[in-house]
Amino acid sequence: MKKTIITLSFILGLSFLADATISQIRWGTTTDPLNGLTLTWSSTGTADSVKWGYTSSYEKGSIKGTRRTGYVSGTYFFKYIFPTVTANSTIYYKLYDSNAHTWGSAGTYTTAPPLNTNAFTFCSMGDCRDYPSVLTSVTNLAIARHPTFTLFNGDLTLSGNSSSQYNTFFSAVSGFLPNNLVFHAMGNHDAADTALFTNLWDLPRVNGTNLYYSFTYGNCLFITINTNDAGNANQLAWLRSTLAAANSNPAIVWKIVSCHHCFFTDGAHSGDMNSYRSTVWKAFDDYGVDLVLTGHDHNYQRSFPVNLNVSSTVPVTTFGSQAGQGRCEIVSGGAGAGLYTQSSTPDAWAINIFNSTYNYAYFSVNGCEIKMTAYNSSNTLIDSLTFNKSSSPSCSGTTGIKLDNSASSKSLNIFPNPTSKNFTLHYSSVYSGDLLVRITDINGREITNRKAVKGTGDLDLQFDTSTYPAGNYFVSVTGGGNSEKSVLVISK
């Protein structure tokens, strides 16, 4: 009897090892969220296969994967490119380990809505390199919202040439990548080994590279750029031509850019992209990009409407893609990297909300409206903004962009605004505790500050501005690791 138990234990051990030889399962695409869908995995085998179908009988059959070299000696990456798939369907799949001669566990993947959809969702996050457990928590929260796809804005590891760190990354997202489509932008730490990063991900390609690319889905143009090589003339020419083509296409309502480096930040990396504001950001302004989604600073930030064609020192009035309207940059760099706190930087004029917390952003596209909600790693709402556009020929309704009145973007209100003599600050955040209120001019010079204590209810403070010169000012409220800011206009 003892001998039998030992034998069974040995067999079970072999079975476990066999399952473990297939890992790093991930979805990609060569085209868009529905077409050119790919499934990639790592294995010690030399002739792995996949079987799949729309039922658990895997009626589409078994097909050998295309093999390429992995990043660890003795392992390979296998890829299968799906033919045209049915939208809004469940794909059932299993992978065959040709080294262990066994089929792995069953997996499923939900295909995207049709290309002409008017409604879909996506997530944005980045910078996960230091704390794998946080990455697991954040991606699990994102999974629960069932995004159509995710934009990951770089820095997967601290050392982009470390195979052990990539192994840790893949282990942390083993519950996320096998059933979610992710579009990657390369971070500065990833760029330590560009060839390795390029080999990892099956993504659309432009000019022979997958480090910058675009795809159209629904009424949105999505563009990923490589900000590690922001001065690349070929990339810039492609960016401008791609945006110009979108502006001549009435079916494109929204233009959304993802990349690693933030162009504006009140955190540690202020100034990193200043050299490219006159080239890359100018393309955003010239062609009316709506959203710029970034990482690099390990926190959450949302900008005021920024249009450098109008002003490099004060925000413009509204978000939007029309002349004179501004871009919305969202920094979501809190997927696991050590957090950065707020600084007093030359970019402070551009930053509306700052929160030093782990986070992800979730976007719901519904025709001519996009609602953004951002959450921390406890899944608590930290910000929300609703974009509503009617300027496109495909849209009708209210002009411009409006804030969501139910969201934390409305936690800080100033009225009357503009004012000539005084104003009331109304703060309705869920936070209670010590606050610091500051009024600064457009150059960041402090005019006054006031400490206050907020209870469980809303806080109202009155300010006398009768002695202030006419002009634009910033009013900020800071407390509990969160900072919110609003523009105050004083007219005489």
Image (tube, rainbow, N blue to C red):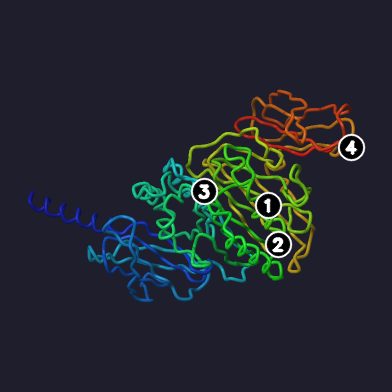
Q: Indicate which disc residue 368 carries.
A: 2
Residue closest to the eye, 353 or 157: 157
Q: Indicate which disc residue 491 carries.
A: 4
SS under mark 1:
helix
Measured Cα–Cα span from mark 3 to mark 1: 25 Å
SS under mark 2:
loop
Measured Cα–Cα span from mark 2 to mark 3: 26 Å
Q: Indicate which disc residue 278 carries.
A: 1
First in residue order: circle 1 vs circle 4: 1
First in residue order: circle 3 vs circle 1: 3
Q: Would you say the residues marked 4 and 2 are in contact, meaning their CB atoms lie under 8 Å apart?
A: no
For badge 4, the amino acid type reads: Ser
Q: Residue at x 79, y 58 (%)?
A: 398
User: In this figure, which residue is indicated by the disc labeled 3?
Assistant: 126
First in residue order: circle 2 vs circle 3: 3
SS under mark 4:
loop
Measured Cα–Cα span from mark 1 to mark 2: 30 Å
Crowding around mark 1 (Cα neighbors within 10 Å: few <14, some 14 to 19, many 20+) is few
Residue closest to the eye, 54 or 69: 69
Measured Cα–Cα span from mark 4 to mark 2: 35 Å
Crowding around mark 3 (Cα neighbors within 10 Å: few <14, some 14 to 19, many 20+) is many
Q: Would you say the residues marked 4 and 3 are in contact, meaning their CB atoms lie under 8 Å apart?
A: no
Measured Cα–Cα span from mark 1 to mark 4: 32 Å
Q: Would you say the residues marked 1 and 4 are in contact, meaning their CB atoms lie under 8 Å apart?
A: no
First in residue order: circle 4 vs circle 3: 3
